[in-house]
Amino acid sequence: QVQLVESGGGLVQPGGSLRLSCAASGSIGSINNMGWYRQAPGKEREWVATDTRGGSTDYADSVKGRFTISRDNAKNTVYLQMNSLKSEDTAVYYCNAEARRLGTLLWSNYWGQGTQVTVSS
C-alpha cells in the first residue's frame, strides 16, 4: 500500500502563513502527480494545486499568487506554502498522489487523512 501523511495545519490569523507537508511512504514504485485539495464545511472538496513529476505546477484561481506548491522527489514529499491567508481558506486540506505500487503497472489515486487549516482572528 501507499500511505500519505499530512502535517502543518493549524490556526492562523488572516494575512498569516502556513506550510503544509505531505509525505508518501509504503510500497512505492513511482509517483506521478502530487497535489492538494481542500474541503470547507458544507462544501464539496475542491482542487487547490498540482505539481507534476516533471516540475510543472498549476493552481486554482482562488489561491494563485498566494499559495506555492513544491515537491522533493527524493523524499516523496509535497509541500504547500500558503501566504496571505484569508478566512475563506479555512478547510480541511487533503494531499493527493497518483502512484504506482512496487511490482505493479497500475496507477492509482491515494489520499491523506487531511489536516485542518483555520484562518481566524
Image: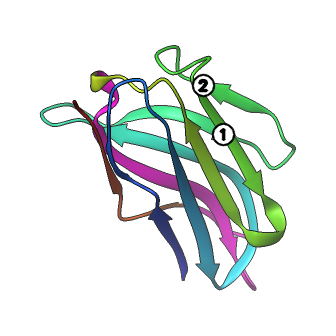
Q: Quadrant of residue 37?
A: top left
In the visual, does 52 lie left or right of 83? right
Relative vertical location of residue 77 with respect to residue 3 in this rendering, above or below: above
x, y percentage for residue 118? Answer: 27, 41
Residue with the mark numbered 2: 59
Q: Amino acid at mark 1?
A: Ile
x, y percentage for residue 120? Answer: 23, 32
Residue with the mark numbered 1: 69
Which residue is painted at 49% across and 32% down in the image?
48
Q: Kindly check if marks 1 and 2 are in contact, taking CB atoms under 8 A apart as contact.
A: yes
Question: From which residue to which does the magenta span run?
Answer: 88-108
Mark closer to the chain start, 1 or 2: 2
In the visual, does 35 lie left or right of 106? left
- Name the main secondary structure of what is drawn in magenta: strand
Circle 2 crowding by C-alpha within 10 Å: few under 14, some 14–19, many from 20: some
Q: Nearer the viewer, residue 35 or 65?
A: 65
Say which element carries label 2.
Answer: strand
Q: Residue furthest left?
A: 42
Q: In whole angstroms, how far apart are the C-alphas of marks 1 and 2?
A: 9 Å
Q: Amino acid at mark 2?
A: Tyr
